[in-house]
Each structure stands twice: as structure tokens, then as C-alpha cells.
Amino acid sequence: MSTKTHEPFESTYHTTHAWLNELMKELVWDDPHLAYRALRVVLHALRDRLTVDEAADLGAQLPMLIRGLYYEGWVPAGKPVRERKKEEFLAHIAEAFKYDPDVYAEGVAWAVFKVLQRHVSAGEMKDVMHILPADIQSLWPRSEALHVR
């Protein structure tokens, strides 16, 4: 049996690793497990506030491994959730880090959004932003390309 890795899997592994490294740099963390948890919880909170079509559009732009993480446990029925406040969004993140008191949920959201902004097309980011309530949009790093009115 060959030990050679299939190229698409090798590529998505490296891309996912790069995203986690970027996230660790943004958060000034050195633990890839914490970065993975941060990416997962923010992507799930974001996904659940998008329409089913928009969630699929965003998912299509994610690398294969991150796409699997994004869709993990997703039940499209009843989406988007009706939570409209920043505090409700952040509560999902805080819950994932309840045993890590030094983790600041708003900073985690901001860092994940910043990494997404670097890797997902500006058009898709605008579409996502247009769906999010203004209160949750306020968590997003500001960029001229994403300015929503």
C-alpha cells in the first residue's frame, strides 16, 4: 500500500493549517486546538444566522476541511435563527470557551471574521454582511470593500 497522500487532501490540510496559523497570530495564541475551536464556533454561529442559500454560498468558498467543519451538525430547517443581538451571537462563542476565562468572545469573532475576509471573495463577504443584523455586523473588521449601508 502506498503512503503517498492524495494531492487534494494534502492541499486542503496545508490551507487549513495556514488559516489556523493566521487565526493564532490574530489572537496572539500558540495553541492550534484553541484556534480550531474558535474557527468552528464562530463559523457555526455565523452559518446559523444566514439564509440557507447564503450559508451554502459561503460554504462553497471555504477550503475542503474547513467546509466540513462549517457544515458539521448543520440542520438547515429553521434557519436563519432569529437571534438579532450581538450579545446573543457572542454568547455562543463564550459558551465554547467557558473553561477558558481569558478568552474574549468579541475578539475571537473579530479574528475569525478577519481571516474570512482575507480568503473569501469581497462579493461574498458583502452578501453575508447584508444578511446579518447591524448589531452583529459591528463585530466585523472594517474594510472599505465591505462597507454596508
Image (spheres, grey):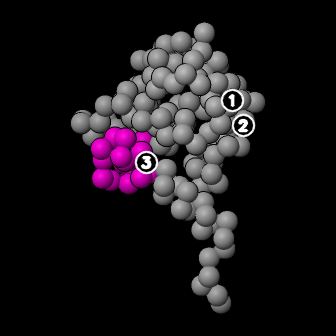
Find the magenta span and give its range: 20-38
What residue is shown with label 3? Answer: 22
How far apart are the alpha carbons under marks 1 and 2? 14 Å
Which residue does the numbered mark 1 point to in the structure image? 123
Secondary structure of residue under mark 3: helix
Label 2, label 3: how far apart the Cα atoms are: 24 Å
Front in this rendered view, residue 99 or 6:
6
Q: Secondary structure at mark 2?
A: helix
- Was residue 28 drawn as part of the magenta stretch in this picture? yes
Number of residues whose C-alpha sits closer than 10 Å to that of mark 2, classed few (under 14), some (14–19) or many (20 or more):
some
Residue under label 2: 56
In the rendered structure, are the residues bearing label 1 and label 3 in contact, judged by CB atoms less than 8 Å apart? no
Residue with the most extreme bottom position: 1
Specify whether residue 74 is in view.
Answer: no
Q: Report x, y in % for residue 130.
A: 64, 18
Is residue 46 visible in this depiction of the protein?
yes
Q: Nearer the viewer, mark 2 or mark 3?
A: 3
Question: Upstream in the sequence, badge 1 or badge 2?
Answer: 2
- Magenta span: chief secondary structure: helix
Disc tally is: 3
Q: Residue at x 55, y 57 (%)?
A: 15
Q: Residue furthest right?
A: 53
Which one is earlier in the sequence, the residue at label 2 or at label 3? 3
The answer to whether 48 is drawn above or below residue 68 in the figure is above
**Figure quadrant of the N terminus:** bottom right
Which amino acid is tagged 2?
Ala
Q: Are marks 2 and 3 in contact (CB under 8 Å)?
A: no
Q: In the figure, 13 relative to 27: above or below?
A: below
- Three-letter code, disc 3: Glu
Residue 4 falls within the magenta-colored stretch: no
Q: CA distance from mark 1 to mark 3?
A: 22 Å
